[in-house]
Image (cartoon, rainbow, N blue to C red):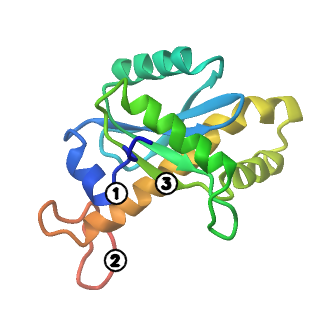
Amino acid sequence: MASDPTLSLEDFVAAVAPGSRLIGLDLGTKTIGLALSDLGRGIATPLETIRREKFTLDAAKLLDICQTHKIGGMVIGLPLNMDGTEGPRVQSTRSFTRNLAEKTDLPMTLWDERLSTAAVTRTLIEADRSRARRAELVDKMAAAYILQGFLDRLGYLQLGSTSSGPRFPIYDDGTED
């Protein structure tokens, strides 16, 4: 069995080209939701949903999108069970990343996606979206939720870093600029 091609958070950050965007993936059985970061890596925006066909076609579409948007790395949702254990969907995600790593050198990392779809669906219901419209939006919004969680963690780590300085100036009195 091939080794896991995904990187730890620290290794991923070191491997991503400076000034490039990140793409977030919500891998479903029928679709792949995609989200895109801004160049500053602070905000995730839903991008699109790929209807899954077969791996080769799905990977080609995904890598074409990555090239179009000058992606520097992929953040892939890891669908852990609520108790943190790994089930069949995690195995499927790991298999997808192993196969994808054979087709690209883009760095990849996994991000816990527990409750992402539930949170997004709840938001869409509260926004009074129809069931059909929710089905159309949920995958790419879940990808944005996953990517935003990663970006928030990344921003938190950068706040403590002296090399790049804080992303948002914080003054001695604790207020932000």
Measured in 3D between alpha carbons, the distance from the residue under mark 2 to the one under mark 1, in whole angstroms, is 32 Å
Amino acid at pointer 3: Trp
Q: CA distance from mark 1 to mark 3?
A: 10 Å
Decide if residue 74 is in sight here. yes
Q: Name the amino acid, label 1.
A: Ser
The circle on residue 175 is 2
Residue visible at 80% across and 30% down? 133
Q: Quadrant of residue 112?
A: bottom right
Q: Residue at x 74, y 28 (%)?
A: 136
Viewer-side label of 1, 3: 1
Q: Position of residue 100 (x, y in %)?
A: 43, 30
Label 2's element?
loop
**Mark 1 lies on residue:** 8
Q: CA distance from mark 3 to mark 2?
A: 30 Å
Q: Nearer the viewer, mark 2 or mark 1?
A: 1
Label 1: few (<14), some or many (≥20) within 10 Å?
few
Which residue matches tag 3? 111
Mark found first going from the N terminus, 2 or 1? 1
Quarter holding residue 158: bottom left
Height in image: 103 above or below 175? above
In the picture as drawn, the residue positioned furthest to the front comes out as 1
